[in-house]
Structure formats: structure tokens, C-alpha cells
Image (cartoon, rainbow, N blue to C red):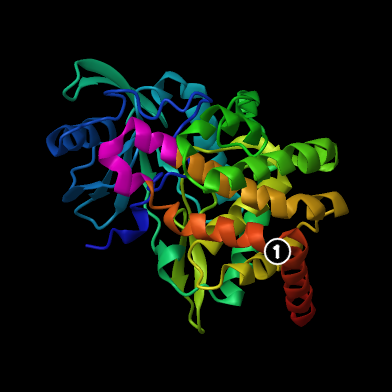
């Protein structure tokens, strides 16, 4: 049974909230459906008799791998009760996935219910009393996460190129509820790095606190005044190493076979998506400083940066590391029983943040932009 390619829906702490308050999974918000309940729902809503149904890891939501007797594969996604209160936002995310797929990118699409709905609101008691959950059945995407394969220059180049293509396509997205992606208080947006100051006390006694404070200061002084020169777009917002699937190529290496988890979508800027992509590819590379160049080269093969965007990239990358670390520590404070799970994305990131802060902007940028130029010349 091959289910590795679909186990990732927010499977790290990189985007697990939809509000500024970071009330990570209010008590009983996460669904707790039994396999029997999930199976019944698949049969009733989709007239599908599962031959295999098993639980998949997740943080806020609940996901099940579903296989039919004919060999078709799906993911049953049950949204937590808090996010289920905003069906229009889930509708935009669902439409965006379909829009990208229609424009040539490998994303999941949603199968309609027998009544023709793409999203079904189900009121069920799964142990906490009767509550409402948004339910979708998504197509299966083959492959393994990019975190599990060697990150060659070519694969990093393709990752940057794919991220840029994705945002370029999303620029054309039209939907009646598109304005919901503004998400002005969304804590994971790189437009809202200053909101971290509300949670900085979780680092009291940790030497990293001073680094985080310094990065936030750099963000205030070096990024915010220049933001008017950034080009706006719709961001996926969580283009991380667990949300990108790959498959072996016929030639050497791997190709990107899937893009997962659109729960972090927000109105942002192209440079934000690039910074996020660099951050999460670095966490899986033995020499993180070598990641930025090929990702940047791939990105600029589709969307060349302007001078202001180039100048802000270093600080935005460090800002994303700070978001991940501070919010993970805050989540551990709320859910100490989940500490090991919640800190997955931060253990390597802490070392990289220290390293890059000590190397400094001039050195890191020199490596990134020289490597990108050399690689572009070879293409």
C-alpha cells in the first residue's frame, strides 16, 4: 500500500493557524473521527466503498487515505471546527487547487459528492458532542516528499521555478471570495512579522531571543519602508519540503509531482514566496548556504526580482525562520504533550538562523547571487 505521498497536510508546524491569536487548535477543535465514521461518510457522500481506509498524520485537521476496489486513491480531508466556520475561505483554496491543475501544475483536485458539492458540511459527534466539519475528498498525488531525496542543484532550481510558476498562475485567479485572502492578522504572513513581538516572551532565557529581536528590528527598518516596491500576488504561503512531492525522472534525479496544502494561502508578494521556499529547502540540505542560489536561479527564470526585492530577501528569509521558531515554542507552551511533533521544523532551523545571522547579509547575498548567476549562465 503506497500512501507516502499523501501524508502531509500541515504535518509540521509551518502553518497550523488561521488567525493572529495563534490559539493553536482550541480544545476539541481537531476532528476525532473513527475509521468506521470516516468509512460511512465516504460511502454516503461519494458512493465509494473503500477497500483501504487508514489515518494519516495531521495537526489541525484529520485526514484518511482511501483506496477503492478498482485501485483509485484519494484523501478524505476533515477540516477542524474552527476553520470549518469559514467555508468561503476553504472554497477559495479548493478553487485555487483546481485552477493550478488546469494550468499545468500538479495539485490535488476535489471530487464532488453525489449531490454535486465540492465541500460538504457535516454535523457529527466524534466524541465531543455534535459539531460541524467541512469534508472534502481529494485526489491522490503519487510521489514522496522532497524532504526525503537528495536536494541537487537541478532539483532546487526546479523547485524555485515551480514556486514562481505557481504564483504567476495565481496572479490570474478570480473568485467571488478572493478578498478573504487578505487575512490582515494572519500570523504566518511575511507581511506580519512584527506580530511576533506579542509572543517573544516564550524565548525568555534563550540566547536566540536577542537574534529574533534583531531580525524583527531589521524587518522594521529595512523591509517595511521598501514594501511599496514589492510586486503583489497571491501566495501559497507554505511551499515547504513536506508540501512538495517528487518522483524519479527517467533520466537521473527527480521531478516535482505534487504541490500540497493550500491552507496558508494569503495575499502577499512574490518575494515572500521565494523567501519561504528558500527557508524550507535549507532545512533539508547539509550545506544550507548553497540552497539559495539554485532556488533563486529557478525563480528568476520565471520572475526576475527587482533591486528592492533582492535587497530584502536575506531579512525575509531570516524572518520566516523566526516565525517558525517563535510560534513553535508558543505552541509547545500550549501543548507540551506535543513538543517533539511541534518542534520538527525548528531543530535544524535554529542552527541555520544562528549561522546566517553570524555570516551576515553581505556574505550570504554574495553566495546566493553569484551561485544564481553562474547557474543561469549554464541554462
Residue at image position (42%, 40%) is 329
- Left/right placement of residue 346 relative to residue 120 reads right
Residue 229 position, x and y percent, is 85, 41
Farthest top residue in view:
130
Q: Main secondary structure of the magenta part?
A: helix
Residue furthest to the front: 205
Q: Is residue 99 left or right of residue 347?
A: right
Measured as percent of width and height from the top left, residue 268 is found at 69, 38
Residue under the image location 42 percent in, 25 percent down: 23
Residue found at x 51% / y 84%? 251
Q: Residue furthest bottom?
A: 251
Please state if 11 lies on the left or on the right of 33 as rendered: right
Q: Which residue appears farthest toward the left when viewing the image? A: 36
- The residue singled out by tag 1 in the image is 296
Quadrant of residue 96 in the image? Answer: top right
Residue 331, magenta (yes or no): yes
Relative image position of residue 208 (x, y in whole percent): 53, 48
Q: Quadrant of residue 219?
A: top right
Image quarter (top left, top right, bottom left or bottom right) of the C terminus: bottom right
How would you rate the neighbour count of disc 1 (Cα within 10 Å): few for under 14, some for 14-19, many for 20 or more?
Answer: many
Examine the rendering and report whether any part of residue 105 can be seen.
Answer: no
Secondary structure beneath disc 1? helix
Q: Nearer the viewer, residue 57 or 354?
A: 354
Give the magenta part as a residue range: 329-342
- The spot of residue 244 in percent (x, y) is 48, 58
Asked if one can make out residue 152 in the rendered structure from this viewpoint, the answer is: yes
Q: Is residue 333 magenta?
A: yes
Amino acid at each position: 500500500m503506497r500512501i507516502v505521498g499523501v501524508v502531509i497536510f500541515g504535518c509540521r508546524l509551518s502553518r497550523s493557524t488561521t488567525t493572529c491569536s495563534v490559539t493553536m487548535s482550541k480544545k476539541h477543535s481537531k476532528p476525532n473521527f473513527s475509521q468506521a465514521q470516516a468509512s460511512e461518510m465516504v460511502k454516503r457522500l461519494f458512493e465509494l466503498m473503500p477497500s483501504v481506509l487508514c489515518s494519516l498524520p495531521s495537526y489541525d485537521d484529520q485526514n484518511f487515505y482511501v483506496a477503492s476496489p478498482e485501485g483509485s486513491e484519494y484523501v478524505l480531508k476533515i477540516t477542524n471546527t474552527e476553520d470549518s466556520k469559514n467555508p468561503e475561505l476553504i472554497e477559495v483554496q479548493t478553487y485555487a487547487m483546481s485552477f493550478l491543475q488546469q494550468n499545468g501544475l500538479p495539485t490535488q483536485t476535489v471530487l464532488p459528492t453525489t449531490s454535486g458539492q465540492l465541500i460538504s458540511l457535516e454535523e457529527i459527534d466524534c466524541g465531543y458532542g455534535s459539531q460541524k466539519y467541512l469534508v472534502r475528498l481529494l485526489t491522490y498525488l503519487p510521489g514522496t516528499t522532497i524532504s526525503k531525496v537528495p536536494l541537487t542543484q537541478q532539483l532546487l532550481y526546479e523547485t524555485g521555478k515551480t514556486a514562481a510558476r505557481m504564483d504567476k498562475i495565481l496572479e490570474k485567479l478570480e473568485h467571488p471570495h478572493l478578498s478573504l485572502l487578505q487575512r490582515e492578522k494572519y500570523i504566518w504572513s511575511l507581511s506580519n512579522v512584527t506580530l511576533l513581538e506579542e509572543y517573544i516572551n516564550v524565548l525568555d532565557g534563550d540566547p536566540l531571543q536577542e537574534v529574533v529581536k534583531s531580525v524583527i528590528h531589521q524587518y522594521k527598518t529595512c523591509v517595511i519602508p521598501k514594501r511599496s516596491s514589492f510586486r503583489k500576488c497571491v501566495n501559497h504561503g507554505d511551499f515547504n519540503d513536506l508540501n512538495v512531492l517528487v518522483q524519479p525522472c527517467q533520466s537521473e534525479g527527480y521531478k516535482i509531482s505534487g504541490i500540497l496544502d493550500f491552507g496558508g494561502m494569503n495575499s502577499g508578494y512574490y518575494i515572500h514566496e521565494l523567501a519561504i521556499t528558500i527557508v524550507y529547502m535549507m532545512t533539508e540540505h547539509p550545506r544550507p548556504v548553497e540552497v539559495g542560489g539554485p532556488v533563486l536561479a529557478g525563480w528568476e527564470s520565471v520572475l526576475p526580482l527587482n533591486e528592492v526585492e533582492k535587497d530584502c530577501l536575506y531579512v525575509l528569509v531570516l524572518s520566516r525562520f523566526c516565525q517558525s521558531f517563535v510560534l513553535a515554542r508558543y505552541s509547545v507552551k500550549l501543548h507540551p504533550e506535543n513538543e517533539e511533533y511541534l518542534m520538527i521544523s525548528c531543530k535544524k532551523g535554529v542552527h541555520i538562523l544562528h549561522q546566517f545571522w553570524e555570516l551576515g547579509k553581505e556574505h550570504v547575498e554574495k553566495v546566493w547571487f553569484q551561485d544564481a548567476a553562474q547557474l543561469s549562465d549554464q541554462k
